[in-house]
Image: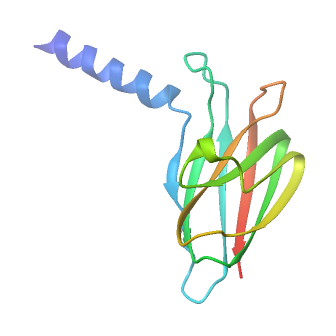
Amino acid sequence: MRKLWVSLLLIGLVLTGSANQINQRIRFEKGASSGTVTGTWHPDPKANESFDRYILGATKGQRVTVTFKGSAPGSVYCWQSDYNNGELASGSGQNASCSFKLPANGDFYVDVGPDEKGQAFDYTVTVAIR
């Protein structure tokens, strides 16, 4: 029984220790029109593609501005409903921003990932909706 418990504990530590992909909803403070999240992106040797995802809800026609600041170059990719339908906006570099008008009501997504080098970085992403 003890071996089973230790094995499960180690598996849990490996899974949580290597978890890279954040899938988190951003909620603004009451009365605020922007929100900021911070994180650390690092390569995941087990995944071909690795990113942190933030989810926000907005209304058709609202203007969304996403600002990215990283300790190393990274990228942000904004999309709505179906990743395969293409991006709403994107930006890359150590300091990047992009802006778009939301084409439909509902959730949209901000993915944070690496540049071509794929090196780890700390980041701050601010999303403003007007």
Q: In this view, does 20 lie to the left or right of 33?
A: left
- 7 to 130, vertically: above or below: above
In which quadrant will I find the C terminus?
Answer: bottom right
Q: Where is residue 109 in the image (x, y as percent from the top left)?
A: 60, 55
Q: Position of residue 67 (x, y in %)?
A: 80, 61
- 53 to 61, vertically: above or below: above
Q: Position of residue 54 (x, y in %)?
A: 58, 54
- 55 to 57, vertically: above or below: above
Residue 66: image quadrant is bottom right
Which residue is painted at 61% across and 16% down in the image? 45
Which residue is painted at 82% across and 47% down in the image? 70
Which residue is painted at 74% across and 43% down in the image? 122
Nearest the viewer among 76 and 85 is 85
Q: In this view, does 91 lie to the left or right of 46?
A: right
Residue 32: image quadrant is bottom right
Q: In this view, does 3 lie to the left or right of 27?
A: left
